[in-house]
């Protein structure tokens, strides 16, 4: 009964689904991973792609389904997790449930960040915590939705 399925059934010429705000390359890699096309899933990705994949996985609630790949992709980038220039790690570690990064990084941001009265936000490395934690394309999920797997 999804809107897209109804429109597809009603159409004789096919259906085009627009996925606005999604990084196309990151989405393709996630789809390969979800559909077990392992020969097409890269074993290493850029940090920017890791961030874009976190946005997509949060938006479509599929982070647990790609958890094995996240362990592979994130390994090389974990050493940068506590540098202000990689503050996107806060969102990445939350989305992919990586408490070994999320918990100490959260403490570091609270201890080293500064509250800016004019902005009314906590800043870390010159960026607001809102910008670091909630990128624009992210859709909120109900609080009851489980986020974490048991292994980090």
Image: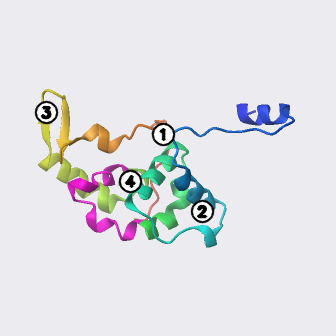
Could you tell which of marks 4 and 1 lies nearer the N-terminus? 4
The quarter of the image holding the N terminus is top right
Q: How far apart are the two marked residues, 2 and 1, measured between alpha carbons?
A: 26 Å
Q: Which residue, given by chain and number where applicable, does mark 2 sit on?
A: 33
Which residue is at 71% across, 39% downward? 16
> What is the x, y in percent for residue 43?
50, 72
The mark lying in front, picked from 1 and 3, is 3
Q: Which residue, given by chain and number where applicable, does mark 1 sit on?
A: 144
Residue 85 belongs to the span the image colors magenta: yes
Verify CB contact (< 8 Å) between mark 4 and mark 1.
no
Q: Which residue, given by chain and number where applicable, does mark 4 sit on?
A: 92
Q: Which structural element holds mark 1?
A: loop
Residue 116: assigned label? 3
Q: How far apart are the two marked residues, 1 and 3, measured between alpha carbons?
A: 32 Å
Could you tell which of marks 2 and 1 lies nearer the N-terminus? 2
Verify CB contact (< 8 Å) between mark 1 and mark 3.
no
Could you tell which of marks 3 and 2 lies nearer the N-terminus? 2
Does residue 122 appear to the left or right of 30 in the view shown?
left
User: Magenta residues?
Assistant: 74-92
Q: Which structural element holds mark 2?
A: helix
């Amino acid at each position: 009964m999804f809107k897209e399925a109804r429109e597809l059934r009603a159409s004789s010429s096919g259906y085009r689904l627009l996925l606005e705000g999604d990084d196309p390359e990151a989405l393709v890699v996630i789809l390969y991973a979800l559909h077990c096309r392992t020969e097409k899933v890269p074993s290493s990705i850029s940090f920017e792609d890791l961030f874009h994949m976190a946005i997509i996985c949060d938006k479509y609630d599929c982070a647990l389904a790609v958890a094995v790949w996240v362990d592979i992709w994130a390994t090389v980038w974990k050493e940068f997790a506590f540098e202000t220039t990689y503050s996107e790690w806060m969102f990445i570690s939350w989305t992919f449930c990586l408490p070994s990064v999320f918990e100490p990084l959260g403490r570091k941001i609270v201890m080293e960040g500064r509250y800016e009265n004019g902005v009314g936000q906590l800043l870390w490395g010159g960026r607001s915590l809102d910008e670091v934690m909630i990128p624009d394309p992210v859709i909120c999920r109900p609080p009851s939705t489980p986020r974490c797997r048991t292994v980090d």
